[in-house]
Image (cartoon, rainbow, N blue to C red):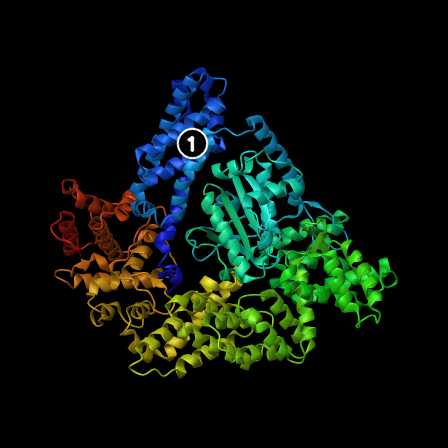
């Protein structure tokens, strides 16, 4: 079934619109200038416009912006007047670049250059229309393509900028850019590993290892990327990841590497936790201007940043959307970023966020492409460890020995070391103690204990600090206070910090209020000097410094520990966490708290999770799904009781079956999380799923519930593909396991499934693929509406439950036939193709297929990689030819060129099939068709009659 899932259900309604948006964006960023013949151009122009001068001029950001706007005008089929306005602006801009040349000469040259660029744009779009006509048609629905529309709206602002030269000179602009790049390199060219002892700055390339970056489920046909690959693809981009996974470091690396390149857009990094709060909020441009002055110590020329944004010569990085704890503020910032993107459509934008909770305030899915940072693989772990220990003062033999030992010994906690932050902490622990804890709280605890022990021994903390005996509980209290107090989210002033610490110490550590205050001042002053604890987070309007925990991960650990101390029991802890978990908040804090409670209380983890499962408060289905998903994620570190696992499984299945069509994404995500987070408990989960299916007794009047139940069974393994964990090894293992479990459930309930599939086209098609019913019975013995037998194999249907769209059987026969090679499902589809060919042979005249029965997009079925696709036998070839003819005929009825254009580009490989389709449009070109050996006379004649236009396979 996996090969038949065409796209995720929740995104299927927006699929065509999103593809159009992204395709339109790709068109606008094509290298038009590279396709322009500079040599020929220079031969027409005066000596001032030689090849070198032209190359420099055409590489200018404003020239690139004009080209993108010209493409937008072409795509939108805009009026000639708009093109002429852009031509005039181009001439005005050229005069600023060739200021020493006679204006009339420059105008003449710029008109010739603009005409050449215009022609190149037209040729590019014409070429694309031939190959992807449907995509260009969708792009031209300007009301749907928000990026294209924003680009068109931006033209007037850009033209105005070009027509009115800035108050600063070109030399001043270049000087600012050069100096700003230097400051960026100085600020971001080194990183500080979370090494609490040394705080040593390391050149970023000496330590950084790029993780694998994978496209999310809604981004198709894209391979795994490195950080450099992501940087090349940046446009409207979201980068998701787990805590400590390297999102912020990735932003820093991209900022640094962009600064190194004179041709890359100028990067502007905005750490969203530092972005002004609503009461002090300014525009993004105003914030950038202020940030450059206050932090980078450089003043940009007046309106220089605005002009860069309008022309697209800028890259904006919004780092840490998740660090805005309040969901409403996250939504507000997301809207601000989207409005910024609408205002400056040529500017590239990257937004980073934690994966969990992102869906509570996501960026516009129709505009932004999402990618995820995957965990380190074995090779990346080894590379990072080698780089990390290379920073130590070790001999070559010592370096090799300790690196090898660490890599081997850390393999006992493979999940932890895939996280870059935790891997770094493990390196610190291993350097000092040669011991690797087995879960996250132990990692944090070991680091904290190691740190405090060193403070005690080397700095005599208890002697110097009045509150030295309560450093640990004070830090935990402060962390929880900062986590839960909305008024300190931007950082806390020294006076606020002293007040809170003093309040905690009074009565708990000291009996005198003034002594508590002095101890608090001493403690805060001490922490200010420890960069691993607090770091400068800016200042208030009055100039008082603000402080935050340097590493949010440690704040979350301390806060989680404090939370467990404040709660009397695992049950009360669960009740405190539930409202946050239901809203998709505090995911890391809650997981850490469950782990800590499990260690400190008898069966604490089980009791907390049981309380969450037993909650009787009425929550929305989304809220309940968030709770169940959280409990499922806890199974990755907690060996829960079988009874808890069974209750979780049962509750999850009931919630999934109760979901409506608009909750398909949440249901599918919950299922994928449940099945992929644990290996230890999956036998219990599998047994409960099987028992659940067997125990459900739906009456004859509730066929929809029965169909939904079997939809869940069939999609079990593939929910992992959509929403399972990102570890490729464990994901593959889970996929194989749940495929086997699916088959066991089907075999145990085969009669019931066969009865249900008579009432649902998609379920019946799944049964064909699973060899439970024959294709003949599917086509001729079942009735689905008014579909004729041939329409049944050509029609795609969306499941009611998950809104997943399955590919039609005929399309999958076609796809596997032309892929070539021995794919895992090749034999299955070869068998089905034989059955389809036999069914076609049984007709004297085939039933005509209504074009409305075919889905609107079938391009992906031609995205085959084998350079010489070849069906394995004559039945596959015949099915491929018939389906090709049907799709080509649908193209013409819909006045599109999706299929024939693609076929024509593969004419050499597809041979006579391409000739058949060509002859249908031009019968005089039919000639003698050389059909493959073994094709029966009856089959050959049917294809010839179609090619001559004597019969149709499709009707309007």
Position in image of residue 709 (x %, y %): 37, 75
Q: Is residue 481 left or right of residue 149?
A: right
5 in relation to 265, above or below: below
Identified at 56% across, 65% down, the residue is 585
Identified at 67% across, 71% down, the residue is 563
Q: In front: 2, or 307?
A: 307
Q: In front: 135, or 313?
A: 313
Q: In front: 27, or 374?
A: 27
Q: Which residue is mark 1?
A: 33
66 in relation to 334, above or below: above
Number of marks: 1
Placement of the C terminus among the 4 image quadrants: bottom left
Q: Is residue 937 left or right of residue 260?
A: left
Placement of the N terminus among the 4 image quadrants: bottom left
Report which quarter residue 801 is drawn in.
bottom left
As drawn, which residue projects farthest toward the right? 463
Position in image of residue 557 (x %, y %): 67, 65
Position in image of residue 859 (x %, y %): 32, 51
Determine whether the residue tagged by mark 1 lies in a helix, strand or loop.
helix
Position in image of residue 294 (x %, y %): 66, 42
Identified at 34% across, 52% down, the residue is 860
Q: Is residue 166 left or right of residue 762?
A: right
Q: In front: 955, or 542?
A: 542
Crowding near the residue tagged with mark 1, few <14, some 14–19, many ≥20 C-alpha atoms within 10 Å:
some
290 in relation to 846, above or below: above
Q: Is residue 528 left or right of residue 554?
A: right
Residue 154 visible (yes or no) = yes
Residue 372 visible (yes or no) = no
């Amino acid at each position: 079934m996996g090969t038949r899932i065409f796209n995720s259900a929740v995104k299927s309604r927006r699929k065509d619109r999103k593809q159009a948006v992204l395709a339109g964006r790709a068109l606008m960023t094509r290298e038009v200038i590279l396709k322009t013949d500079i040599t020929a151009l220079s031969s027409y122009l005066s000596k001032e416009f030689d090849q070198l001068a032209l190359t420099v001029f055409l590489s200018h950001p404003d020239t690139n912006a004009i080209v993108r706007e010209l493409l937008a005008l072409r795509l939108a089929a805009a009026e000639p007047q708009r093109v002429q306005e852009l031509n005039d602006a181009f001439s005005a801009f050229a005069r600023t670049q060739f200021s020493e040349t006679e204006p009339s000469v420059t105008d003449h040259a710029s008109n010739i250059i603009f005409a050449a660029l215009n022609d190149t744009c037209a040729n590019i779009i014409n070429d694309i229309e031939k190959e992807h006509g449907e995509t260009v048609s969708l792009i031209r629905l300007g009301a749907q393509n928000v990026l294209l529309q924003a680009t068109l709206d931006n033209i007037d602002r850009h033209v105005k900028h070009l027509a009115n030269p800035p108050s600063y000179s070109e030399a001043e602009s270049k000087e600012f850019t050069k100096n700003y790049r230097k400051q960026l390199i100085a600020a971001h060219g080194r990183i500080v590993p979370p090494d609490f002892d040394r705080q040593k700055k390391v050149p970023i390339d000496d330590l950084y290892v790029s993780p694998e970056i994978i496209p999310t489920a809604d981004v198709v046909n894209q391979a795994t990327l490195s950080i450099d690959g992501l940087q090349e693809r940046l446009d409207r981009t979201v980068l998701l990841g787990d805590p400590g996974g390297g999102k912020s470091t990735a932003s820093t690396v991209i900022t640094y590497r962009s600064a190194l390149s004179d041709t890359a857009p100028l990067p502007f990094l905005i750490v969203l936790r530092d972005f002004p709060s609503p009461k002090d909020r300014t525009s993004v441009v105003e914030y950038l201007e202020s940030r450059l002055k206050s932090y980078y110590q450089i003043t940009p020329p007046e309106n220089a940043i605005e002009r860069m944004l309008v022309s697209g010569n800028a890259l904006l990085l919004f780092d840490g959307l998740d660090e805005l704890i309040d969901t409403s503020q996250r939504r507000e910032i997301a809207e601000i970023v989207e409005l910024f993107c609408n205002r400056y459509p040529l500017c590239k934008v990257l937004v980073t966020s934690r994966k969990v909770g992102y869906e509570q305030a996501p960026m516009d899915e129709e505009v932004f492409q999402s990618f995820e940072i995957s965990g380190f693989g074995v090779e990346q772990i080894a590379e990072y460890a080698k780089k990390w220990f290379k920073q130590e003062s070790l001999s070559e033999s010592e370096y090799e020995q300790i690196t090898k030992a660490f890599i081997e010994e850390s393999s006992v906690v493979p999940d932890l070391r895939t996280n870059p932050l935790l891997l770094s902490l493990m390196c610190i622990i291993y350097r000092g103690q040669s011991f690797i804890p087995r879960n996250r709280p132990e990692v944090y605890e070991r680091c904290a204990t190691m740190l405090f022990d060193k403070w005690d021994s080397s700095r005599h903390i208890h002697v110097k600090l009045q509150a030295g005996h309560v450093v640990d509980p004070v830090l935990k209290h402060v962390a929880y206070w900062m986590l839960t107090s909305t008024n300190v989210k931007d950082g806390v002033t020294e006076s606020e910090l002293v007040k809170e610490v003093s309040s905690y110490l009074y009565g708990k550590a000291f009996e005198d209020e003034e002594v508590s205050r002095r101890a608090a001042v001493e403690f805060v002053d001490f922490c200010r000097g420890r960069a691993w604890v607090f770091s400068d987070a800016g200042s208030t309007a009055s100039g008082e410094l603000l402080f935050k925990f340097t590493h949010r991960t440690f704040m979350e650990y301390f806060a989680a520990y404090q939370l467990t101390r404040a709660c009397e029991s695992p049950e009360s802890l669960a009740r405190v966490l539930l409202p946050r978990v239901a809203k998709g908040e505090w995911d890391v804090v809650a997981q850490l708290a469950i782990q800590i409670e499990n260690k400190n209380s008898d069966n604490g983890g089980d009791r907390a999770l049981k309380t969450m499962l037993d909650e009787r408060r009425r929550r929305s289905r989304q809220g309940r799904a968030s709770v169940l998903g959280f409990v499922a994620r806890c199974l990755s570190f907690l060996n829960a009781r079988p009874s808890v696992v069974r209750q979780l499984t049962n509750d999850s299945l009931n919630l999934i079956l109760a979901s409506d069509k608009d909750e398909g994404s949440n249901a599918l995500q919950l299922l994928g999380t449940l099945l992929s987070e644990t290996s230890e408990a999956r036998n219990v989960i599998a047994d409960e799923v099987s028992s659940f299916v067997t125990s459900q007794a739906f009456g004859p009047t509730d066929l929809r519930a029965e169909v939904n139940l079997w939809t869940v069974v069939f999609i079990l393994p593939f929910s992992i593909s959509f929403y399972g964990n990102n570890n490729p090894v464990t994901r593959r293992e889970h996929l194989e396991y749940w495929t086997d479990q699916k088959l066991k459930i089907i075999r145990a309930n085969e009669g019931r499934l066969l009865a249900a599939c008579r009432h649902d086209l998609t379920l019946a098609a799944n049964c064909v693929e699973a060899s439970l019913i024959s294709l003949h019975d599917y086509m001729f013995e079942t009735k689905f509406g008014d579909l004729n037998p041939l329409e049944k194999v050509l029609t795609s249907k969306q499941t009611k439950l998950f809104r997943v769209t399955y590919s039609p059987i005929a399309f999958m026969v076609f796809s596997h036939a032309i892929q070539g090679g021995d794919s895992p499902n090749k034999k299955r589809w070869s068998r089905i193709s034989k059955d389809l060919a036999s069914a076609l042979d049984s007709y004297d005249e085939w039933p005509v297929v209504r074009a409305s029965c075919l889905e609107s997009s079938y391009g992906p079925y031609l995205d085959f990689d084998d350079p010489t696709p070849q069906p394995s036998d004559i039945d596959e070839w015949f099915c491929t030819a018939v389906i090709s003819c049907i799709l080509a005929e649908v193209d013409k009825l819909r006045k599109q060129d999706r299929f024939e254009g693609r076929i024509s580009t593969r004419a050499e490989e597809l041979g006579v099939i391409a000739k058949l389709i060509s002859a249908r449009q031009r019968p005089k070109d039919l000639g003698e068709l050389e059909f493959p050996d073994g094709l029966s006379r009856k089959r050959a004649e049917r294809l010839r009659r179609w090619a001559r236009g004597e019969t149709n396979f499709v009707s309007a």
